[in-house]
Image (cartoon, rainbow, N blue to C red):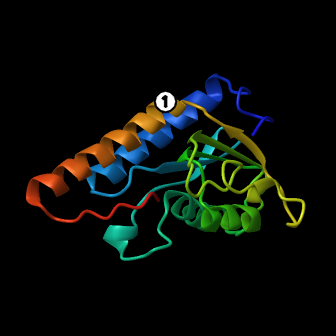
Amino acid sequence: MSDGWAATDDRDRSWMRRALALARRAADAGEVPVGAVLVRGDEVIGEGWNRPIGACDPTAHAEILALRSAAIQVGNYRLVDSTLYVTLEPCPMCAGAIVHARIARVVFGAADPRTGAAGTVFDLLRSSQLNHRAEVTGGVLAEDCGALLREFFRARRAVGSATGAEVTISAG
């Protein structure tokens, strides 16, 4: 991810703070704390936070929900000239949707060492084998994004060990 790890500005940090607020909504609902904001120009056209448990929908990741709400708002599934801000590096499913939606740029906070598809494990967003590529900037407010995830999982593990229940956790 050499072409964007350091290239960040105040605007990126501001939109990532908004994505972090959405991630906290997910955490408050017992979901893995991931938030996403889709911006075109200076206007939010879609946003979402993880809801797969509450929605009983394995595709209800923050990015997918942001893309869905934006497509409805603009009346088109092609979301060209937009930037997606997301607190955790997108997974392969979300990366595929980002490519299909023709998102111009993806800015993420924390890298995902297990399923990251924006350069950490896979690099689907910049693959020359796909018909669209997105510019990727990673590591924006990475410490804040990572701390929120670590605290969420730490609390989940503590609940599991206190009750003796097995706790299964999967990053969204």
Outermost residue to the top:
10
Q: Is residue 10 left or right of residue 127?
A: left
Residue located at (24% from left, 46% from top):
155
Residue 141 vs residue 48, the one in the foreground: 141
Can you give x and y, in whole percent of width and height, for residue 61 in the image? 49, 63
For residue 62, say whether it is visible. Answer: yes
Residue 142 vs residue 21, the one in the foreground: 142
Residue located at (25% from left, 52% from top):
156
- Does dot 1 land on a helix, a strand or a loop? helix
- Eyeballing the image, is 8 above or below 100? above
Q: How many labels, in total? A: 1
- Eyeballing the image, is 8 above or below 113? above
Q: Is residue 86 left or right of residue 149?
A: right
- The amino acid on which the numbered mark 1 sits, given as a three-letter code, is Glu
Residue located at (67% from left, 67% from top):
97
Residue 140 vs residue 36, the one in the foreground: 140
Picture quadrant of residue 128: bottom right
- Eyeballing the image, is 53 above or below 137? below
Can you give x and y, in whole percent of width and height, for residue 14 in the image? 55, 29
